């Protein structure tokens, strides 16, 4: 199929930009989601043929509705846009940091997914990839960043938001399974991006993480759904 279409939210930089680039190389027509039109346009120019701009702020209902109205059919939705505004442990995290984080990482994903469901339902094999985090795992402690090891309770707003995203991944998978959807969560690993100011030094190549998203975007009809995978395809415990 040569007319497959994908949307990557937050694709103007970081891991999302690499996902958009790789999906374009796979032959997808890729909507580069960007809340800033100018920066999104630059990314589209850099990726080249196959990429097109979709102005989309996942926290703005008007922006989400306008973006969804522009897309008739969608084969792959990558919910990649995310923020991490605080590395504080739970007892020191203010509610405002929780609210801001959940607004993007949780409510934004629900808003975008629900708005694009009609377009996804027009695909013969719809796929949703939720870019989560290994730090959301309640049992996993292999992060190279000691701030994030589960026993220490740091980055509480971010990690709990991604745990909520994981729960939503399972709920969407259950709800949409009979319609042929595959809905999975990805732990990209610590990557050198702008996500946490000053933390880029501990991260690896974001392009490598993007391969994991593409693998989940290309799942066959007998592939898994409602699961959580590392970028290299290894299952991650919830
Ligand atoms: P970046 O900060 O480089 O990129 C985040 C992207 O999300 C940017 O394009 C940003 O846009 C976009 N974004 C943020 N808020 C919104 C919004 N309201 N609407 C639309 N877009 C928005 O970080 P990463 O590339 O590292 O992050 C990508 C995903 O990977 C996130 O979900 C993150 O949680 C996850 N992740 C990253 C890890 C890492 O080590 N880097 C590890 C684990 C998970 P703008 O440029 O306008 O701010």
Image: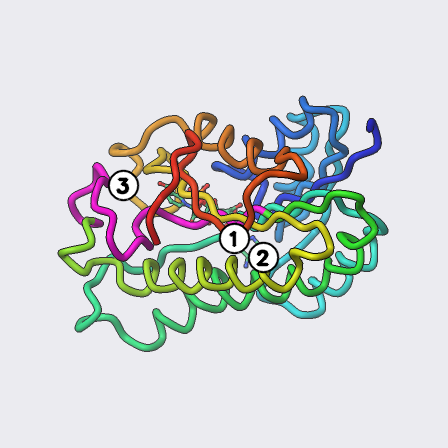
Kindly report the distance in space between the C-alpha atoms of the residues bearing marks 1 and 2: 5 Å
Scheme by which the image is coloured: rainbow
- The circle drawn on residue 173 is 2
Q: Which residue is mark 1?
A: 226
In the figure, 93 relative to 33: above or below?
Answer: below
Seen at 44% across and 32% down, the residue is 233
In the structure shown, which secondary structural element does the residue marked by tag 1 occupy? loop
Instruction: Give whichever of discs 1 and 2 has the lower sequence position.
Output: 2
Image quadrant where residue 143 sits:
top left
Answer yes or no: do the residues labelled 1 and 2 have beta carbons within 8 Å? yes
Stretch in magenta: 129-148
Is residue 140 located in the magenta-colored stretch of the structure?
Answer: yes
Q: Position of residue 200 (x, y in %)?
A: 31, 36
Residue 199 location, quadrant: top left
Confirm or reject: label 3 Cβ below 8 Å from ligand 1: yes
Query: Where is mark 3, residue-wise?
Result: 199
Camera-side mark, 3 or 1: 1
User: Is 221 positioned to the left or the right of 188 in the image?
Assistant: right
The answer to whether any part of residue 33 appears in the image is: no
* Residue closer to the observer: 178 or 12: 178
> In the rendered structure, are the residues bearing label 3 and label 1 in contact, judged by CB atoms less than 8 Å apart?
no
Q: Is residue 67 left or right of residue 58?
A: right
Label 1 Cα crowd, 10 Å radius (few <14 / some 14-19 / many 20+)? some
Q: Is residue 174 magenta?
A: no
């Amino acid at each position: 199929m040569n007319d497959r279409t994908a949307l990557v939210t937050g694709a103007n930089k970081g891991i999302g930009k690499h996902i958009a680039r790789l999906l374009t190389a796979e032959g997808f027509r890729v909507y580069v989601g960007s809340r800033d039109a100018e920066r999104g346009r630059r990314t589209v120019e850099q990726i080249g043929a196959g990429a097109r701009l979709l102005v989309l702020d996942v926290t703005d209902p008007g922006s989400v509705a306008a973006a969804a109205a522009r897309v008739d059919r969608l084969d792959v939705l990558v919910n990649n846009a995310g923020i991490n505004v605080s590395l504080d442990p739970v007892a020191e995290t203010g509610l405002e940091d929780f609210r801001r984080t959940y607004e993007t990482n949780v409510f934004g994903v629900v808003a975008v997914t629900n708005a694009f469901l009609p377009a996804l339902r027009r695909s013969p094999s719809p796929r949703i990839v939720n870019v989560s985090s290994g730090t959301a795992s309640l049992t996993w402690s292999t992060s190279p960043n000691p701030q994030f090891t589960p026993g220490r309770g740091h980055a509480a707003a971010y990690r709990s938001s991604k745990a909520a995203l994981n729960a939503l991944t399972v709920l969407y998978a259950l709800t949409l399974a009979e319609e042929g959807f595959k809905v999975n969560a990805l732990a990209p690993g610590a990557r050198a991006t702008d996500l946490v100011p000053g933390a880029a030094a501990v991260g690896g190549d974001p392009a490598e993480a993007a391969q994991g998203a593409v693998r989940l975007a290309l799942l066959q009809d007998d592939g898994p759904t409602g699961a959580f995978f590392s970028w290299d395809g290894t299952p991650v415990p919830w």
